[in-house]
Image (spheres, rainbow, N blue to C red):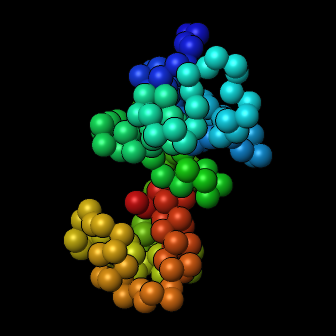
Amino acid sequence: MNLKLTNFNDFIKILLASGFSIGGGNDEGIYAIVDYDWLTVPPGSPIVWHTGDLETDPWEWRIRVLNERSDIAYAKCFFKKSGYITQELYPYFLALRRGGDDFDDEYTDGKISHNAKRIYEAIREYGELPLQEIKRLGGFRRDEKSKFDTALTELQMRMDL
């Protein structure tokens, strides 16, 4: 399949065909459909970062994926960097990340931080929540923003959220 990337729908077609993509370029060599570096965009390409155009701005696509698609996950799941995983490949990533291990057992074994458990418990009890509610229910103070962000990324990397 040789698709040309000119808009959001092309991005979705390529993503569904490939199964995953980091959100942009990276030094780790992870497959990316579109590079973060807008300076490397070929001349005449309609794909341009940070224009606010829902069709041609990859920065906007992450929100569109979350709002419009139920078959694609978007989270910090690649070396603590954001990316996409399709429903088809999700079980494989999940098996590699968690290997069937139970969250509570992993916590008891010291493999999950206390801050991550605070977030996980709030979401387990209340379901989908805005970040401010997760912080409040998890008992995070204003001065714990860094701890909260680190724990949230930890849960995303483990694919617990």
The residue drawn where x is 32% and y is 83% is: 136
The residue drawn where x is 58% and y is 32% is: 48
Tell me residue 123's x, y (percent): 30, 70
Q: Is residue 52 above or below residue 77?
A: above
- In this picture, residue 64 sits left or right of residue 40: left
Tell me residue 125's x, y (percent): 24, 73
Q: Is residue 24 above or below residue 129?
A: above
Tell me residue 126's x, y (percent): 22, 71
| Residue 84 seen by the camera | no
Tell me residue 138's x, y (percent): 36, 82
Q: Residue 56 or 13: which is nearer the viewer?
A: 56
Rendered-image quadrant of the C terminus: bottom left
Q: Is residue 159 above or below residue 66?
A: below
The residue drawn where x is 55% and y is 50% is: 82
Q: Is residue 71 above or below residue 133?
A: above
The residue drawn where x is 49% and y is 28% is: 56
Give the quadrant of residue 63: top left
As drawn, which residue projects farthest toward the left? 126
- In this picture, residue 80 sits left or right of residue 114: right
| Residue 148 seen by the camera | yes
Give the quadrant of residue 64: top left
Q: Residue 115 or 57: which is nearer the viewer?
A: 57
